[in-house]
Amino acid sequence: MTDAFVLGVSRHTIWIILLITLPILGVGLAVGLAVSIFQAATQIQEQTLTFVPKLVVTFLAIVALLPWIMHVLTAYTIELYSQWPLLLH
C-alpha cells in the first residue's frame, strides 16, 4: 500500500461524502432562506417557524434521495472491495 493509493482512496471518499450530503444540505439551505425572507417580510420572529420546516424538508429529501444514496454507496463499496488485492502488495 503506497501513500498515493491511500491519498487517492481518501480523496475519493471525501468526494463521495460531498456528493451525498450537498443535495440534502442545499435543500435545507433553500428552505431556510425562504423562511428567513418570509419572516423578514412579515416580521414574524417565531423560532419554530425556522426549525420545523427545515427539519421536515431535510427528512423528506433524505427519504427521496435514499435509493440514489444507497446506489452510490454500494458502487463505492464494490469499488473498494475490488481494490482489495492492491492493498496486499
Image (cartoon, rainbow, N blue to C red):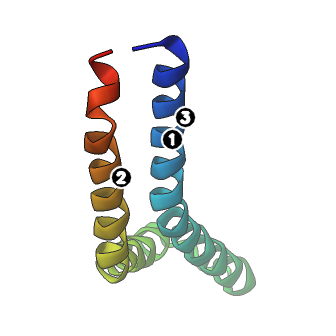
Q: Are marks 1 and 2 in contact (CB under 8 Å)?
A: yes
Q: Which residue, given by chain and number where applicable, does mark 1 sit on? A: 12
Residue type marked 1:
His
> x and y percent of residue 67 in the render?
29, 77
Q: Is residue 69 left or right of residue 84?
A: right
> x and y percent of residue 20 in the render?
45, 60
Secondary structure beneath dot 2 equals: helix
- Label drawn at residue 11: 3
Q: Is residue 55 left or right of residue 22?
A: left
Residue type marked 2:
Tyr
Is residue 57 positioned above or below 77 on the image? below
| Residue in the image at 37% along x and 77% along y | 65
Image-quadrant location for residue 75: bottom left
| Residue in the image at 27% along x and 60% along y | 74
Categorize mark 3 by other alpha carbons within 10 Å: few (<14), some (14-19), many (20+): few
Residue type marked 3:
Arg
Categorize mark 2 by other alpha carbons within 10 Å: few (<14), some (14-19), many (20+): some
Q: Are marks 2 and 3 in contact (CB under 8 Å)?
A: no
> x and y percent of residue 35 in the render?
59, 79
Q: Are marks 1 and 3 in contact (CB under 8 Å)?
A: yes
Q: Is residue 4 left or right of residue 51?
A: right
